Image (cartoon, rainbow, N blue to C red):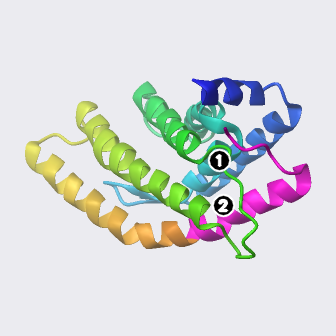
Amino acid sequence: MKIFKESVRELTDLRAVLVTGLLIAVSMVIESFSINLGFAKINFAFLAIASIGMLYGPFVAFFAGGMCDVLGFLVAPTGGFLPLYTLLGALQGLIYGLIAYRILPKRTGRAFDIEILTRLIIARIIDIVFINLICNTAANYHYGFLRTETGLAAAIIARISKNLLELPFDIILIAVVLTAVLKAYTMVFGKRKTAA
């Protein structure tokens, strides 16, 4: 519970609110360049949500993930608004916030810290398995986008293939982008206190 209390306290800092808003806007821009394959979308908007989770924790990232879904619908409405997808977007932020909050690079002289990279990759794998493969597929089936058991099986196979192909690129982007975000944040705003 301590990590949630610390994350809630982040919202009392104007800097945190502004950076979170900026990263939500970045997520919206990235989302606008996504490629819709019908059974799945290829995009890298998770980087912005992962950055929020890493910098401000699970509560802020949960809120930001939900906001990204709502704002995405308002900016480019396609079909009806489905609150379950908003919850899934919020849960995505929660995953990154729980795993990656309050991590700082150790003074190793390397371009990135292996602990940071490992935790972010673990968060991405949990996001892929839990949110992308299980929850989104179940939501699509629940809402009738997948009408038959055969369609469900085909969607699962297609989603697994898509995510396995995308994972190496995700890892490279995590290593480059999120490490740069943490480094830039630390340089601009100073060193953050690590969790006990």
What residue is shown with label 2? 178
- The C terminus lies in which quarter of the figure? top right
* Pointers 2 and 1 in contact (C-beta within 8 Å): yes
Image coordinates for residue 14, horizontal then vertical, percent: 87, 32
The rendered magenta stretch, by its main secondary structure, is classed as: helix
Outermost residue on the front side: it is 196
Q: Which residues are magenta?
A: 173-196
Which residue is painted at 65% across and 70% down in the image? 176
User: Which class describes the residues within 10 Å of circle 1: few (<14), some (14-19), or many (20+)?
Assistant: many
User: Which class describes the residues within 10 Å of circle 2: few (<14), some (14-19), or many (20+)?
Assistant: many
Q: Quadrant of residue 108?
A: bottom right
Mark 1: which amino acid? Answer: Met
What residue is shown with label 1? 54
In the displayed structure, does residue 161 sit left or right of residue 49? left
Image coordinates for residue 166, horizontal then vertical, percent: 42, 68
Q: CA distance from mark 2 to mark 1?
A: 9 Å
